[in-house]
Amino acid sequence: MGKEGKIMDKKIIDNIKALAIDMIDAAGSGHPGIVLGAAPILYTLYARHMNINPSDAKWINRDRFVMSAGHGSALLYATLFAAGYDLAIDDIKNFRRIGFKTPGHPEYGVTPGVDMSTGPLGQGFASAVGMAMAESMLATKYNEKTKGLFETGKSLFDYHTYVLCGDGDLMEGISQEAASLAGNYKLGKLIVLYDSNNVSLDGRTDMCFTENVLNRFEAMGWHTQYVKDGENVDEIDKAITKAKKVLDKPSLIEIKTIIGRGSLLAGTNAVHGKPLTKEDITQLKEKMDVRAIPFSMSNEASQEFRNMITNRMDNKYSKWNDYLKEYLEKASDETKTELNSLINNTSININLPKLMWELDKDMKEPLRDTNGKIMGVIADNIFNFIGGNADVASSTKAYLPKYPAYNATSYSGRNILFGVREHAMGAILNGLAVSGFRVFGATFLAFADYLKPSIRMASLMNLPITYIFTHDSINIGPDGPTHQPIEQLAMLRSTPNLDVYRPADAKEVVGAWDSILKSNKPSAIILSRNEASLLQTSDMSYVSKGAYVVRKEITRLTGIIIATGSEVSMALEIAEKLYKSGIDLRVVSMPCVEKFIEQSATYKEELIPVGYKTVVIEAGSSYGWFRFVYNDKYLMTIDKFGVSGSEEEVLNHFGFTTEQLKTKIEKLFK
């Protein structure tokens, strides 16, 4: 790179820095440290490496970028604006304000060019592993095996996933789990740029983070490099170029930077998370030789930046589109349908009840087993249905036996072996889902807490992920309180935009999946390990309404029992016994509280009419059920941790046998 080129590099970088600093100043909040320290990294990546088209931000073969250090959002937005993405100057001026495309942390679906919502540190890093896995799967399935790489225009899928992370991301345990898995799966298209400045919010990292990061990643099977000067664009460029040539290992490039470089507070934690003073901004802009007027980015700088991208990408983009057209002309109807679904981000819907076999009225099996069979039918009919377990497939039965496992020698598998890594599994599912896959992840319900941050991010992004949680009750007895879920159902139900299904029998499991596949949003399905009989009055078609009557009163309505899961059969038995005592109870199965709440007032009133005593039976926390009852006497729930013992001992200990519950309910109606 000649002298003029280096001058232009610096001019563009300094203008990006100034614009981001103005955004933070106008908002009165933000993180200037990463802006001033890491701007050269992001500039080098976008100017010289990212295969993108700002005019087609959702191009399916674009390189992905994840700002795992999500507090660096102002830097990302300023870079995207300068690169020509669909961001108006008003979006830039209104950073962190409602109604604009520049939220406080990057949000998927809000800002053009943002490929993943980030914020909680480590989440972006781990999600990027899922994005890299998605590329490996798509390339394996659709690329012509005899053709070359992207530059020939003869590969449908050939993109890299880049990550910018900081010390905080690498301290979080989720990144350790995900990095271990990425190395195991040899994800060569994953390149992590580590903004290494030795400072975090509370001070220097040597107080709490002293290991040799490169050695740690090498031990996990990563290719590593070190760039000693984070201002040196050419050295950063060379390191990325070298990383792209390593096809059998993910890459980590440690780039030494100075947090808040150029600020009066440079190199200290004081510059991390609050706006610079007016004095500091003035001296900084003078030093960088940029205009003092806020939001006055140089037209020459932005135009040159855009030219760098278009000159590098126009031919590649057009060649890829030509090849796509050629590919589709030769493809089978099935492949055309699949690719159109991926390119247009649309779902392939199926009518699951029509595909399912006739259920034997005498069937009796654990719902986890039934669920596994149903998933097999789904996989046969939905090409992008994939997922895995946190080393518990043999227990959850959430496995696709007709399909191979995903591994480093065969990326065509549809069963992902996450190992004992619930945290990483949750985030990796997010990365797969934003890449066009319909995914599932499974573990025990008591371990749902390990996935909670990732479930929250999936719910924020509205991703079509299904979480399968088995071993749903204290009735797993001998495993003891560490494995007996209590508060997990309440936790999941309290998460906005997450539908939680707890089916009572095989028909309700089919109905739950049918509803899930049609909703295109995150869902959880909660399943029993114990055997369940088919209920005569259950109805898969009503599961999508969230609740329905499974026992109608025979003569005159006395009251109502609401139950979920395996407690529905208990409620039916109790109602039949109490009828003989003159208490005529309606039993309502409520497999999905969220779906029921969405129904019309008329439907809800017909099902649970006002003025009648209502009892809830569920072997879990009472939280969330108070809306249906007069007071806590009507809640047959459990608000303390379990105990170790046989199933019968544990249920008896908590007063949760059919006879004990019948006695309690009878007293309420007499």
Image: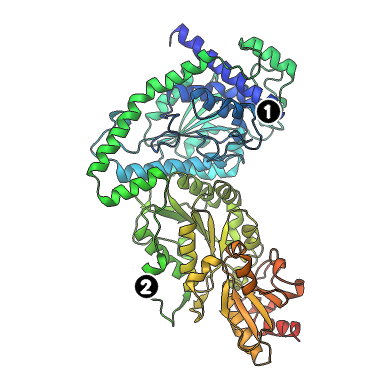
Three-letter residue code for mark 2 = Trp
Viewer-side residue, 3 vs 651: 3
Which quadrant is the N terminus positioned in? top left
Work out whether residue 7 can be spotted: yes
Sequence-first tag of 2 and 1: 1
Give the distance between the C-alpha atoms of the residues marked 2 and 1, in whole angstroms.
59 Å
| Residue position marked by numbered label 1 in the rendering | 272
Viewer-side residue, 542 vs 577: 542
| Residue position marked by numbered label 2 in the rendering | 357
> Where 327 falls versus 51 (above or below)?
below
Q: Residue at x 36, y 52 (%)?
A: 413
Query: Which residue is situated farthest in the top direction here?
Result: 3
Work out whether residue 415 can be spotted: no
User: Around disc 1, counting alpha carbons within 10 Å, would you say few (fewer than 14), some (14 to 19), or many (20 or more)?
Assistant: many
> Where 476 falls versus 239 (above or below)?
below
Q: Residue at x 51, y 9 (%)?
A: 7
Q: Nearer the viewer, mark 2 or mark 1?
A: 2
Q: Position of residue 371 (x, y in %)?
A: 45, 67
Q: Position of residue 577 (x, y in %)?
A: 63, 89
